[in-house]
Structures are given as structure tokens and as C-alpha cells.
Amino acid sequence: MTTHLSRRHFLRSTTAAIALPALDSLGFRRFAAAAPASAPPKRMVFLAFGWGVTAETWYPDAKEPGAGYKLPVGLQPLARHKKDFSIVQGLTNKFSNDGHFGSTFWLTGANRYAKQGQNFANSISADQVAAAQLGQDTRFTSLQLNGGQEVGGEGHGPGLSLAWNANGKPIGGFNDPVETFHRLFSGDRVPLEQQKTLLAERRSVLDTVLDSARDLQRGLSKTDTDKLDEYFEGIRDIEIRLNKDEKWLGVPRTKAPLAEPKPGLAGLEEIRLHYDLLTAALQTDSTRVVTYRLPVNTLLKSLSITINGHDMSHYHLHQGTEKRDASQARDLALSETLAGLFDKLKAVKEADGTRLFDHTTVAFGSNIRTEHDLNNCPTLIAGGGSGLKLGHNIVAPKDTPLCNAWLSMLHGSGVNAERHGDSTGVLKEIMA
């Protein structure tokens, strides 16, 4: 069948096409779940926190590389999973120059001053590189979760997201776990025909905007043309999202494998709930790529600690142990909840009897080591999704780009990427 299906033809044919079997010739790859059982898909999860770690008690001894290392105090809650994760030391984002940006450039490795005349620029994040390939067949190409409601107070930096698109623009996500639950699993109460009408109206508005912008394009200066090109990129992003909505029009959402969460949870309980939700999202194949900006200040409050995250991160500058104790308590809480996430991923069985954990790669860390130190980014990589070396204390050569780790994860998960950010190649020390 060689008939060309235009966008409008596709829209007119949506109802009939949904009733058809999964014909590859028509491009309906989203019905892959109904195909004969095959190898479980690869998944990737990126978890970032601000304000760094307690350096003296979080990192293993760099003189004990390999599998026989002693687990440090800050990672003790992960002891039962020791063989299933690796700590990677020596990784750096060489362009990072702000000790308060815990996640803005964490997954991009971008040069903030890359664009002449601007003091801020970013590029695509590793999760979005993965999502472009792994997210083609899922309802949600990727899922962005943002913990904590204190803007600027969690040590993450600008953007309010770990995820950045190909144009270096932040991709918004969900702050409220209840909202996330309903977006993932609640059925759409709007009748199907009305949904089609709304999508058609959005298409019409988009076409009108594009036509008007193209008319405006004539006679503009280069600076204004560059601005308009950036605007067009934003419009194309909207069109991609509309395409996704059209593909899933009329396809019921998967039944939730967990109860609707209670509203108002914060800190420790919010993290646990977000971990439940991201596990459910992966389990139901609603998405295969997740990012989560972990809260810190709300976490401290839930631990009955009154010190704020910024002051805590500067524990070296203060006499006494109060701020350092707070930092260590934060480390233990993050390790404890991460261990709980690993338990959940291991408990979920795939159709072939393997564990969800075996097909998922989890990256956990920050762009900040401690205080304003940006060298030796704390990095933990777990799960079998990328086939990387686990159970080791890996000490990479000094100043190895953090993006080498992301490139290794991408390659191991079957994602085509020649390089990423400032990478110089895969991280040989973690390749199995």
C-alpha cells in the first residue's frame, strides 16, 4: 500500500483507523502492546537532588575501586541492593559554574554561555534523547515529575525541570502527585467526538498562527528572524504533542495498579509516592522515560529539621555539627527512599517472568558535590536496562565528562547517539 496519508486525511480517518488491526503500513505502531510477546522494552529513570551530599560520608573510598569496597554511611540503607548499583566517581560537568544549579545542566552538559550575547543557554537533556526513541510507542513520550513547591529553594537552578528539549527549553512537568495520577490513569470524561473537535480546533489555530508568522517573516532583520525561528521550533513542539494526542485518541488508559493518592503529602512521603507513581507508569508502559527533581527543603521539614537546604550545604563553614548532621540525615533519607524504589522495581514482574528492574536503568545524583563544589558529581547508576557494570565503586579518570556516563546509558539501552553534550566517548570503566 503506497497511498500517501496526509495529516488532514489522517484526522478524517481517525475513527475508522482505530478499528483497524495494527498495520505497520499505516504507521500505527502504538498497538505494539497487542503484538506477540517479545523482549520487555528498555526504560530509563533520572533522579536529581539539589545541594549536593555530605562528601565525607557519601562517597566510597576512592582507593578501594571494584566490587569489594566498603559501603559508606550515607549509602547504608542501600546495602541490600549493593550488587545492583555502581557508584561512579570523578565525573564533572566542565561548563558548570554555579554552585546552586543542581540539575539545570545535569543531563545536558551544555555551555551556559554558548550563545553569543546571552548569559544563559542550554541544550537537549539525555532523557529527551532517550525519549525520542524509547517513547515512540507509549502514550507519554516521557514523564517529568517535580518535587517540592519552593521555587529557587531546592538547589536546582533555573528551568524547574530536568528535561530540556532540542532547543534547550525546559519541558514542564507535574508538581502534584494527585495530578500525575489522574493524568496517567483517569479516563477522559470528554466524549470522543468532542475530543476530535477540540483537536481539530487546535490544529486550525496552529495553522493560522503559522501562516501569520510566515507572512511576518518577510523583511525582518537577522535578529528578529532568529527569534522567529525559535518561535517556529516552539510551534513544531506543539504540533508533535498534538500528533501524539491524535494517535492515542479513543484508546482507554490503563487501569491504575495503585490507589488514588491522598493530597497534601510533602517531603519524605511525597518522594515515596512519586516513586510509586513512576513505577506504575513504567509497569503499565504508559511511558519508558522518567525524570524526577527531588525536593530537599520539604524533605528536611518532614524530618523535623529546621535548617534550610542552602545553609545545610555549607556545613563546612559553621562550627558545631548541627548542619552536618542535617546533611547526613538528608543523605540517609534519600538513600532509604531510593532503596524502596529498587524494591518496587524488583517486585514488578514482566510478561516473560523477569523483573522490571532488569530492564530499567536508574541514574541518581546531582551536579553539585557539596557547597559550591562542582567536581566529582555524585553519581549512582542502577538496574539492568543498559547492561552496565553494577556492584562496583568505579573511579573514573579525573575530569571525565559526566555526559560520558549518560552516553554509556544511552548506548546500553539501544539509543542511537554518537555523542551527548560534552562527552568524549562512553565511560569505559562502567561498560560491562
Image: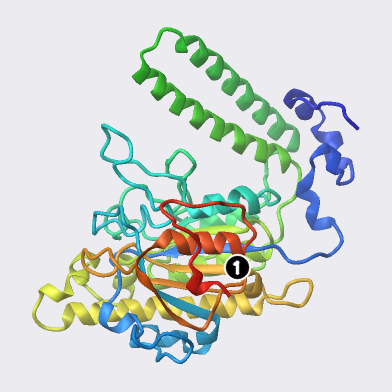
User: Disc 1 marks which amino acid?
Assistant: Ser
x then y, percent, for residue 94: 31, 56
Q: Is residue 307 visible?
A: no
Name the colour scheme.
rainbow
Disc 1: CA contacts within 10 A as few (<14), some (14-19) or many (>=20)? many
Q: Position of residue 288 (x, y in %)?
A: 62, 58
Residue 49 image position (x, y, % from top left): 37, 65
Residue 118 drawn above or below residue 278: above
Q: Can you say which quadrant of the picture contains the N terminus? A: top right
Residue in view at x 34 percent, y 80 percent: 59
Residue at point 46% right, 8% down?
Answer: 218
234 vs 250, left or right, is left
Residue on which disc 1 sits: 386
Residue at the spot 24% in from the left edge and 67% down from the top edge: 309
| Number of dots carrying numbers | 1
* Residue found at the far left of this picture: 319
Where, by quadrant of the figure, is residue 47 drawn?
Answer: bottom left
Q: Position of residue 340 (x, y in %)?
A: 51, 79
Measured along the vertical axis of the image, is residue 233 above or below residue 215? Answer: below
Instruction: Pick out the residue farthest to the top.
Output: 219
Q: Quadrant of the C terminus?
A: bottom right
Label 1's element?
A: loop
| Residue 295 in view here | yes
Of 169 and 190, which appears nearest the observer?
A: 169
Q: Is residue 111 left or right of residue 179?
A: left
Residue lying at 25% horizontally and 39% vertically, measured from the top left: 119
Write down the quadrant of residue 343 in the picture.
Answer: bottom right
Position above or below: 335 against 157: below
